[in-house]
Amino acid sequence: MIELDFSEQIAALRATFADIRSVVGVDRLRADIADLSEQAGVPDLWDDTERAQKVTSALSHRQSELARIEGIESRLNDLEIMVELANGEDDQESADEAVAELKSIQKTLGELEVQTLLNGEFDPRPAVVTIRAGAGGVDAADFAEMLMRMYLRWAEQHKYPATVLDTSYAEEAGIKSATFEIDAPYAFGTLSVEAGTHRLVRMSPFNSAGKRQTSFAAVEVVPLIEQTESVEIPDNDIRVDVFRSSGPGGQSVNTTDSAVRITHLPTGIVVSCQNEKSQIQNRAAALRVLQSRLLLLQREQEAATKKELAGNITASWGDQMRSYVLAPYQMVKDLRTDYEVNNPSNVFDGDLDGFIAAGIRWRKQTPQG
């Protein structure tokens, strides 16, 4: 005789859901959707392609967020019916479905609850992620490419649009660096906890002696700024170089000098873009990423000044925030949160939500000055 009783769990989920609805602001979401729908319906919208893309993208993001919220309420109601059917008909298959659905709703609500913790100034923005190979030679370049694939797979699993802006390939294997944009609501807030130094320990496939190798890669995450917030950059503060984009091993993949590298002379920040077809498009994309980095740098300097004035200069992030160990045992562990899993292959395949959620909760509980 099947006797499922999820009343306590469902009551707890409904309470959590009510808090999430309040924080997200469903009425505000609906008002935004109505306003954006009206803008999207203007006949001459696409006369200004950039504005049209901005409006339609914002509308799509908000519609998805509202659908996700409203879908939870419907699923909670359906879950109660599933439990009644399983108990009333003594049906094991229905009971198994109800258990699986309960776990699925708990996971979805957990993700939404984490999103409500993202209330920083730039948290709702899309993200620009840059990965650079560190110490460790060829293994570090290979590790950097593994991390790039990991984040792109994570974005793909969440159906977040991702665009690779620049890739600098290493000579033997892997990449020296790569920059890509993830265009999704709260992408910056979500991925900002991934910023820092990542460490890989494994038996090196590039070492004939088969010795264990430790290598490092750095992950940088900045918010993509709005055009209206562009940081003014005087022309004499930048150096612009053009070159031909290249593939693995230095192989040329373009016959024209369309790739662009911009160096910001006062800070030494360098941004490259070779994804677009024309030099003008690559320059515009690179300049936007540079502006994003300068804006974040400005905010960080302001925050550092505030900390100094307050007498609190303790660093919030260590040099090494996560270890990926493939030998002699299998483990991925975040050194800030102590969150760990024993299946690195899943993590490298984009299974990052547990680490991200733990990082966001950790940051919320840790004084940042």
Image (cartoon, rainbow, N blue to C red):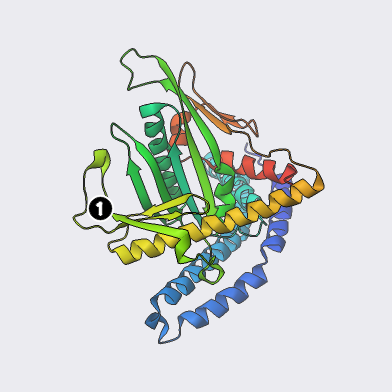
- Residue at far front of view: 236
* Up-down relation of residue 360 to residue 133 (above or below): below
Judge by depth and name the residue closer to the eye, 124 or 132: 132
> Is 299 on the left-hand or right-hand side of 266?
right
The percent coordinates of residue 4 (x first, y second) are 65, 41
Instruction: Please state which amino acid type lies under the numbered disc 1.
Output: Arg
The percent coordinates of residue 294 (x first, y second) are 55, 57
**Viewport quadrant of the N terminus:** top right
- Count the labels in the image: 1
Q: Is residue 281 visible?
A: yes
- Residue at far top of view: 209
The percent coordinates of residue 218 (x first, y second) are 49, 38
Q: Which residue is mark 1?
A: 244
- Residue at far left of view: 255
The percent coordinates of residue 74 (x first, y second) are 60, 60
Q: Is residue 13 visible?
A: no
Dot 1 crowding, Cα within 10 Å, few <14, some 14–19, many 20+: some
> Is 244 on the left-hand or right-hand side of 1?
left
Q: Residue sitting at 38 percent across and 27 percent down?
A: 137
- Residue at far right of view: 310
Judge by depth and name the residue closer to the eye, 185 or 248: 248
Residue 45, picture quadrant = bottom left
* Up-down relation of residue 364 to residue 212 (above or below): below
* Up-down relation of residue 3 to residue 182 (above or below): above
Q: Secondary structure at mark 1?
A: loop
Q: Residue sitting at 43 percent across and 31 percent down?
A: 345
Residue 333, picture quadrant = top right
Q: Residue sitting at 55 percent across and 64 percent down?
A: 67
